[in-house]
Image (spheres, helix red, strand yellow):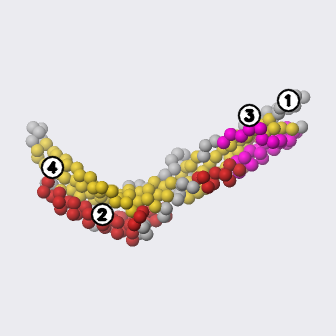
């Protein structure tokens, strides 16, 4: 006598518990009977590394302004670094970069030079594990904007870098959930769950909480993995 149980029927009641059944079929007249099930594991984690860049600019009208522009640019850099340290970041986390020079020329329809500008753009990068200080540090930079500094406060990127630390437990949980799903199916089919015939691990996914894609905007993130396990079924 052949026993067939619909995987769809079982999945409806099990998906919310972190596991579900797919392509599950039991036939008593087949020599080897198996059930293919998927197990889900999820974790809510906090970003542990932040990358943040700040650009500051000074502009002059003529080439003769350039020495003064460099002096002003250095003063701006010192102000930004001091503010970041006051916000709680260590000197090693604050990395000033080079100052880039740009010249813009403005010409009329006859290609006659009518105006020009000379621009110096500096950049400071912050790489820190003090992720909760970043938002406050960005707000404090507004003081310099209020003072008239031409400053671009770029959005930070938040990363979770400790995935390897939670992988073993998550894979264990996913496999356990898969076995629970197999047991539910086996009970309905009137058989028992045996050992594992094979297992396939899906890729780990990291997403910002509440987002369908992307993993750098928010401090809180969701980590997800699905494993596919084939269990033997026994009479």
Give percent across and percent down for residue 163. Answer: 59, 52
Left or right of 107? Residue 27 is right
Magenta-colored span: 173-201
| Cα separation between marks 2 and 4 | 25 Å
- Is 188 above or below relative to 42? above
**Numbered circle sitting on residue 31:** 1
Q: Nearer the viewer, residue 72 or 207?
A: 72
Give percent across and percent down for residue 156. Answer: 43, 56
The residue at 71%/45% (across/down) is: 39
* Residues at marks 4 and 3 touching, judged by CB atoms closer than 8 Å: no
The residue at 67%/52% (across/down) is: 168
* Residues at marks 1 and 2 touching, judged by CB atoms closer than 8 Å: no
* Residue occupied by mark 3: 23
| Cα separation between marks 4 and 1 | 85 Å
For residue 188, say whether it is visible: no
* Residue occupied by mark 2: 77
- Find numbered disc 2 in the image and state the secondary structure of the residue it sits on: helix
| Disc nearer the start of the sequence (2/4) | 2
| Disc nearer the start of the sequence (4/1) | 1
| Cα separation between marks 3 and 2 | 62 Å
| Disc nearer the start of the sequence (3/2) | 3
| Disc nearer the start of the sequence (1/2) | 1
Mark nearest the camera among 4 and 1 is 1
Mark nearest the camera among 2 and 4 is 2
**Numbered circle sitting on residue 116:** 4
| Disc nearer the start of the sequence (3/1) | 3
* Residues at marks 3 and 1 touching, judged by CB atoms closer than 8 Å: no
Mark nearest the camera among 3 and 2 is 2
């Amino acid at each position: 006598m052949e026993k067939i149980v619909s995987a769809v029927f079982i999945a409806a009641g099990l998906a919310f518990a972190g596991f579900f059944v797919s392509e599950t079929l039991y036939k008593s007249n087949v020599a080897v009977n198996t059930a293919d099930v998927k197990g889900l594991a999820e974790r809510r984690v906090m970003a542990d590394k932040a990358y943040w860049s700040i650009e500051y600019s000074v502009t002059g009208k003529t080439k003769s302004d350039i020495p003064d522009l460099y002096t002003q640019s250095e003063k701006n850099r010192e102000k930004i670094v001091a503010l970041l340290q006051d916000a709680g970041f260590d000197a090693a986390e604050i990395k000033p970069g080079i100052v880039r020079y740009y010249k813009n020329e403005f010409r009329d329809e006859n290609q006659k030079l009518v105006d020009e500008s000379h621009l110096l753009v500096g950049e400071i990068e912050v790489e820190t594990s003090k992720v909760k200080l970043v938002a406050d540090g960005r707000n404090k930079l507004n003081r310099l904007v209020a003072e008239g500094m031409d400053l671009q406060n770029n959005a930070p990127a938040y990363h979770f870098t400790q995935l390897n630390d939670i992988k073993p437990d998550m894979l264990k949980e996913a496999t356990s959930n898969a076995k629970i799903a197999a047991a539910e199916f086996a009970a309905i089919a009137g058989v028992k769950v045996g050992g594992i015939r094979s297992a396939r691990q899906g890729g780990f996914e990291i997403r910002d909480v509440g987002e369908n894609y992307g993993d750098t905007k928010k401090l809180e993130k969701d980590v997800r993995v699905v494993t596919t396990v084939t269990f033997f079924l026994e009479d």
